[in-house]
Amino acid sequence: MAKGLTKRSVDYSQWYNELVIKADLAENSAVRGCMVIKPYGYAIWEKMQQQLDKMFKETGHVNAYFPLFIPKSFFSKEADHVEGFAKECAVVTHYRLMNDPDGKGVVVDPDAKLEEELIVRPTSETIIWNTYKNWIQSYRDLPIKCNQWANVVRWEMRTRLFLRTAEFLWQEGHTAHATKEEAIEETETMIKVYAEFAEKYLGVPVVQGVKTANERFAGALETYTIEALMQDGKALQSGTSHFLGQNFAKAFDVKFASKEGTEDYVWATSWGVSTRLMGALIMAHSDDYGLVLPPKLAPIQVAIVPIYKSAEDLAKISEKVDVIVKNLKDRGISVKFDDSDNRKPGWKFAQYELQGVPVRLAVGPRDIENNTIEVARRDNLTKEVVSIENIDAYVADLLEKIQDGIFQKALDFRSEMTTQVESYDEFKKVLKEKGGFILAHWDGTSETEQKIKDETKATIRCIPLEGDKTPGKCIVTGNPSKQMVLFAKAY
Amino acid sequence: MAKGLTKRSVDYSQWYNELVIKADLAENSAVRGCMVIKPYGYAIWEKMQQQLDKMFKETGHVNAYFPLFIPKSFFSKEADHVEGFAKECAVVTHYRLMNDPDGKGVVVDPDAKLEEELIVRPTSETIIWNTYKNWIQSYRDLPIKCNQWANVVRWEMRTRLFLRTAEFLWQEGHTAHATKEEAIEETETMIKVYAEFAEKYLGVPVVQGVKTANERFAGALETYTIEALMQDGKALQSGTSHFLGQNFAKAFDVKFASKEGTEDYVWATSWGVSTRLMGALIMAHSDDYGLVLPPKLAPIQVAIVPIYKSAEDLAKISEKVDVIVKNLKDRGISVKFDDSDNRKPGWKFAQYELQGVPVRLAVGPRDIENNTIEVARRDNLTKEVVSIENIDAYVADLLEKIQDGIFQKALDFRSEMTTQVESYDEFKKVLKEKGGFILAHWDGTSETEQKIKDETKATIRCIPLEGDKTPGKCIVTGNPSKQMVLFAKAY
């Protein structure tokens, strides 16, 4: 295992916290709850952004940018939204500092008080719908399908790097439609985009479903979610897509003239994923040696380490490696030839292991003689010595295998950790002894949901869209249940 | 000219304000001084970002992300910086809202007052150097070359879309070096990167130079700038790169152990460009018909408008156009075939003109017969009918010509609008009657600089790095001058 890294089996939570720091992904800042995303962590986030952005554009969305600040009064306009969002947030009350008359520091200028306080956006529905009001007059102006990449702030009391921070980075899509059907279709399209991204890029299998009323986004009529399972058997909500009905259109008086000349409120959706995905990525795949990154999101896909004693050895190795580097780059593979002389090969091996580089190549003098190269896989920690001929094709193929393998491993783990239970006793037993996802019948009431949560800390992660839809009887009340729902303890 | 757009000759300022709105680039929001960047404007900004980001990475930089908030006390640590930046800024004093006990709105919870106020970053030197302190122990940790894409807030009282807004988007590079020489080299490298970007991508010629002490960034020992000339003869500072010496290292106690075992403070630079570049882009090239975009930054490089009466006509045209679209896309050219039937061709022509699409193609039934196509250039408003054969190669070549032509036109304008003067009377006369850049000798004192500013509103834009370096005599005091400096009225 990596030097000084707590084992997952000893303390999973501690392992995560240490790994984020040791792998140089992020750290806490001087501002409570706000993180610094370090270059290596940010490079992974950038790869996520690029892929998501591409998928958003392919599904007809455009990017835009809306203000960081929201007038306080906007939060009072949508009744449910105010309950959910206008609470723990950063409030700007003044717009000027002045020299402290009594010292050498600065103090808030009491004369520079804002007439109306501004809230640092916790999410942008209100300011965006206030803007859309001016953009929409007729059906010809619809649909509007905007996305925004931005920072948001929610004043969380207990924070953890990536998983829950006061400031985080995210994207938020906000769309406006002429019909209910079109808005629902958009909501469903976007949760599918998120699921595809999670599975094909993050390598994390997800359950798609809808949230219960209790767990819905504040102001939504329906919240779709993707739920992922972490290695400790806890669920991580990884992306949500909300059908907002006409709630925000009504709150901000956004009407449009239809083709038929009637007037109606506009239908809305919003959807988002955040730097929380970094947490999902780390917790789903990594091990006691460090990060395990899926090749598609790895900033460095291949690291090449020369093993040499003399300058002559290095020259011979470099000559061979330069060709490999060129061939890999021509295939669009990101590669780092680490010929720095201030660290030993063993140190470099451990470092690339810690940082989750999917493939490590090592070349020594004997390899040059034999025309071979050592290939090490990060995902399963296997090594083999192969011919240096066509190594670029070999590596390209291996990266695909690793991407698939990482997903398959996570999928197998999830299958193993998903239990269908028939009684509340069994539910509690599984939750206590095994954890993971639990499929169980539920009577559809908030009361039962709350009782289970209070007694076990497990929540309904979602009502799955796919899978067994057989009706049954609630494990708690025995009342009729339409289908089994997915329970878990969650981050 | 575009419908309802004020002519530049009538009111340049009004023309700019209207054009930003009419071309759908941005608009004012409900929050004073904060703008909404609309999808078309944001698409241009994204193109700028992509190119700049590429250039930053090619010069060895990595991206990272630092907190939005800065503890108030941080601003007191660097004496000059506090004077320049800790004044007009957004101050967060509370972290919670609560339901108004007397009504249905929300009010600030008086119990949720922060112990120390947080400032929404106006620039990030302080929080970043506070972070770098933990990253730097020895020369092995240097250099650090981070860039951040972020939003910043400066509480401007008089705002104009893109040119001066309370919140704006920008990038800020922050680098740390072991030696003074290396930091100066970095500062100079980055101003050259900005100059190259401005000239090759924005198509805007710039003068590179250093700022006088009065105009320096708060906390810098030297500020390098690129200065562009707008069509109204005013200058626009378009990017700056600062050599910060050891000021921030001293303020945040950031020392490193050198190779020789001595301990020294770290050397710093910072550099940034912002959405202000959008203002430069618009004001440098556009005309009374609307935007003129350089092809390299145009979200749509080619628009194709079919001219038809019957569905048969359209079918024939589409058949030909589909091939053209494919061929253009294969060349990496962004193209829009606008076969929407709710607008007439004339309306579409005007719209693409207003939005500055560099090349517009029009195809009618006669073109199909003759195997021709009409090509319209946005930059010089010329049209010609050419053969449809190899039109993709023709257009690719034309886009390059337009890119070069736009730059050359701006360069010619600047040459014409740059005047060398020998006396203060001549200076004032040129400033009043012609405007533009004025090259004049200056004695190097802040007093003379201030006197000229007070009397004429012209400021020293920079001490140019290139050009005539002959010494002379100050136009105001007659005292010795090392070289002519660049004056102008500025945005």
Image: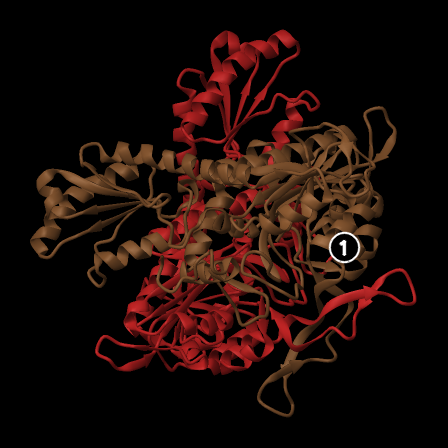
Chain colours: A red, B brown
Q: Residues within 10 Å of mark 1 (few under 14, many from 20)?
A: some
List x then y, in percent, for residue B136: 76, 38
Q: In the figure, B311 relative to A302: above or below?
A: below
Asked whether A436 or B122 is in front, the reply is: B122
Outermost residue, right side: A102
List x then y, in percent, for residue A88: 63, 72
Q: In the figure, B443 relative to B251: above or below?
A: above
Report which quarter residue B110 is drawn in: bottom right
Outermost residue, bottom side: B102
Residue located at (42% from left, 23% from top):
A392
Number of residue marks: 1
Asked whether A121 or B55 is in front, the reply is: B55
Does residue B130 show up?
A: no
Residue located at (11% from left, 50% from top):
B315
Horizontal side, residue A471 vs residue A398: left or right: left
Residue located at (54% from left, 82% from top):
A76
Report which quarter residue A183 is drawn in: bottom left
Does residue B222 show up?
A: yes
Quadrant that contains the N terminus of chain B: bottom left
Q: In the figure, B61 relative to B217: above or below?
A: above
List x then y, in percent, for residue A432: 55, 64
User: Badge 1 is on which residue?
Assistant: B84
List x then y, in percent, for residue A403: 43, 39
Amino acid, disc 1: Gly
Asked whether B489 or A408 is in front, the reply is: B489
Label 1's element? helix
Asked whether A78 or B52 is in front, the reply is: B52
Q: Chain of mark 1?
A: B
Horizontal side, residue A451 vs residue B437: left or right: left
